[in-house]
Amino acid sequence: MIKNDNRFDVAVIGAGVIGCAVARELTRFTGSVLVLEREGDVCEGTSKANSAIIHGGFDAKPGTLKAKFNVLGNSMMDRISEELDVPFSRIGALVACLSEDDLPKLEELKARGEENGVEGLVILSREEALRLEPGLSDGVYAALFCPSSGIVCPFELTLGFAENAARNGADFRFSHEATAIRREGDGFEITAGGEEFFARAVVNCAGVFADRVRGTVAERDYRITPRRGEYMLLDKRAGNTVSHTVFGVPSKFGKGVLVTPTVHGNLMVGPTAEDIPDPEDTATTAAGLAKVRTMSALTVRGIPYKQVITSFAGLRAHGDAHDFVIREDAEIKGFFEAACIESPGLSSAPAIASHVAKMVKERLALSERADFDPIRRGIPKVASMSDADRARLIKERPEYGQIICRCETVSEGEILDAIRRPLGARTLDGVKRRTRAGMGRCQAGFCSPKVIAILSRELGVPYGEVKKNG
Amino acid sequence: MAENVKLAIIGGGPAGMAAAIAAREAGVGDIVILERDSELGGILNQCIHNGFGLHTFKEELTGPEYAARYIDRVLGLGIRYETGTMVLSVSENKEITTVSRARGLLVYKADAVILAMGCRERPRGALNIPGTRPQGIYTAGAAQKLVNCDGFIPGREVVILGSGDIGLIMARRMTLEGARVRLVAELMPYSGGLKRNIVQCLDDYGIPLKLSHTVVDIKGKKRLEGVTVAEVDGTGTPVPGTEEYVECDTLLLSCGLIPENELSLTAGVELNPVTNGPFVNDRLETNVPGVFACGNVLHVHDLVDFVSEEAGRAGVAAAKYLSGDGGEAGRILDIVPGAGVRYTVPSTVDAGRCDEAIHVRFRVRDVYRSCSVRVAAKDREIMVKKRRIIVPSEMEDVILKRSALEGVEGPITVEIVGV
């Protein structure tokens, strides 16, 4: 017998950016929402290790779901970032081609983009491109400029969706891996984390595991190949190497290596694209990191690789049909999927979520809630506020005057907020993604003992039980 | 609404305290030390091993004992200090923006500033070690803080990459705490730490030091499971076929220290790309008049005794600057690193008004045996000092006499000869 606490109208599998966005959109409607996540926190898979770009939408083939949701998602980002207090900046992107021979590729991208509904695309000569972006390499022949492309903080975006969903009543269960889903009456029984749940509808947002999740309830009619991408992140001193996102001309393995400032002022370079068998293998490799260097040098000159502060790898959920799978199952009514979400998945997340939530609403005959609150306020950031605001905040809450992370100027107040807020941090990485403590140039050398002490105190666990992640 | 202060010292570690004491003894009344941690002493507080103070006090002290000697003098001299105070920026006109729990946002307007922020450890990312990113990887200093201050042993099976002094000290510490230190791998063909630390921290405990080796892969998803160590060739490139997998739950990194000069940059201070510290003249003054630097923020030292000595000179120089005793600039000579020398501190000397004796500190590029340190100007040799062995991991010091600079045409070159 399933406990009443474990009975919901909708169960979302996966608390990455897609799952959290879907959960948030679902809370606009009547009906209870459950989110099941195998890891101990939101944003633990693809959502935490990607290019952090809100793409314009010129790369995807016209008519695909990627094209549709990317362009739509991009247009929604200003409002989303406002509502959820997420750093987002439309800095524009350049696709650099290296020879006259490649010019047709730029023209093709421009035509594709225009067909997809991307506005403002223009092909620039080398001179014009250099005026816009003096950091381009000597080999750049021409560039496609996309003004609507932007950069975002993917952690904050995922947290924003999740916290807002939780505030509006969604129930998140971490360390609950959905291992079996069974059709039962007018809904589904789900086994997760040693518990049984019931939901009238299920939304599969399980990232690189989505095909396996599907396989427990339906025929696996798509396959996901984890496609690993390796990145390097450089010190903020290198953040002004470029002021736009600079891509090379795309290939069948994706958009190639990009060079971009991040919303926090670092420089990011990557990714590689390598199909691998293990959906958990986020190891970096010497060859991959070397490739990032070689490829980036083609489009941007003088990247100061001595200032790398960390490198990482993420996995995209590449589907064998080369497009997103976004649907209600044709046979199993009530089983919804937002799967094979590789790039431009982050960009598409708001639009996918809105679309999927509406399908669920129709299926379950839900109605709009009058009391949905779309606003989420992030943690106050001492690093980026004015002196007047700092003075006011510390006067009110002295713990915001105690700086714990010196590199990123993160205060004890921010860390306490990160732990105490809904869906609060439970690990060093959880604190890091919410506050940036440990994200800076010393990579937590100085602040990790202090953050461990705070976590230990707040959670009431000994040092040895304070984990880096999971 | 800034608070005026004659001399602001950023950092209350060994450098900041010694600078403050010297400045006060040279007559500066209005001093404030700004310290981000909750107490004075800096990194000494976590260095509970002995070996400090042999030069300064002619006795062997632990880090906290050495710090206490200076803290007592700071207290005795009534020098003001603010702990828990983070400096967010220093402007070119010496406005220092701080935040603290106790006093909120506070801006100081100083007549002179001494930079004494110390240094940080080079993190894994900067070393470009491939592999996973599990729990169990710490810089040696972070592990030292956990073990010595917080009473937490981060692991039981340890590999140490880099033979910097903190790594060597931690090899011994972890062993004494019951962990098994499998090996210390060092990329270079020579150690990065002091000879005495190799002997006392590795040899005495039978811990192997593998020179010309590095970590080429890291395994483990949640928790570190092991690392792959390989030999490197003369260019630091791993040699295929030499890989060896070593099981461990902890990897400590002791791969170099980086002077922490982000604040210096906000003040417009020009940095030497070799040391990552400011360019300074013989008074330890940066290119920004009235802004001085000393200790590990200037260049990384091996011994705290030399930090204190150098910082004392910065304090005296700041006092002179504040009393208007600096005088007109005289005859400025460049001091440049020559053959075998990576850098010198200072990088200029004012032959017209410098002290009677000028310390020139430097590090060499490689291990040199039976050689000489030669200091020379274009037209003459200033000094030659014979050396049996000279190594990159030990800071060198030559003292130039002011009288020897009379009539010298710059620049002055410091070089290694007779190799």
Image: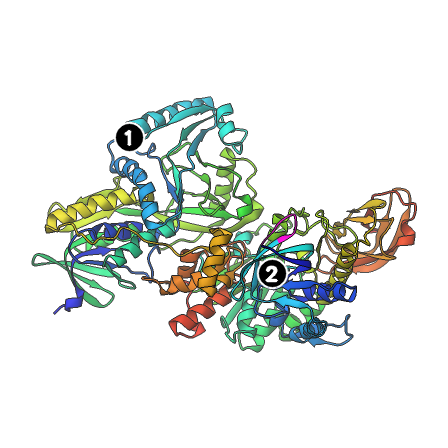
Which chain is indicated by disc 1? A
Separation of marks 1 and 2 at Cα, in angstroms: 53 Å
Are there few (<14), some (14-19), or many (20+) residues within 10 Å of tag 2?
A: many
- Image coordinates of residue A349 in percent, x first then y, are 29, 45
What numbered label is drawn on residue B162?
Answer: 2
Amino acid type at image mark 2? Gly
Of A37 and A34, the residue lying toward us: A34
Q: Answer with left or right where residue B75 lies relative to residue B123.
A: right
Q: x, y percentage for residue A330?
A: 12, 45
Residues in magenta? B89-95
Could one spot residue A24 in this view of the protein?
A: yes
Residue B245: tell me if it is visible: no
In this view, the residue in front, A107 or A242, is A242
Residue A136: x and y in percent read 51, 32
- Image location of residue B302, percent across then percent down: 70, 63
Q: Is residue A327 above or below residue B164?
A: above
Which quadrant would the N terminus of chain B be assigned to in this image?
bottom right
Question: Which chain is mark 2 on?
Answer: B
Which residue sits at x=76%, y=72%? Answer: B54
Residue that badge 1 annotates = A116
Kind of residue sitting beneath label 1: Asn
Tell me the SS state at disc 2.
loop
* Residue A270 forms part of the magenta stretch: no
Q: Residue B90 lies in magenta, yes or no?
A: yes
Q: Image quarter for residue A5?
A: bottom left
Left or right of B63, for residue A145: left
**Disc 1 vs disc 2: which is toward the camera?**
1
B17 or A179: which is nearer to us? B17
Q: Residues within 10 Å of mark 1 (few under 14, many from 20)?
A: many
Q: Nearer the viewer, residue B190 or A355?
A: A355
Element class at badge 1? helix
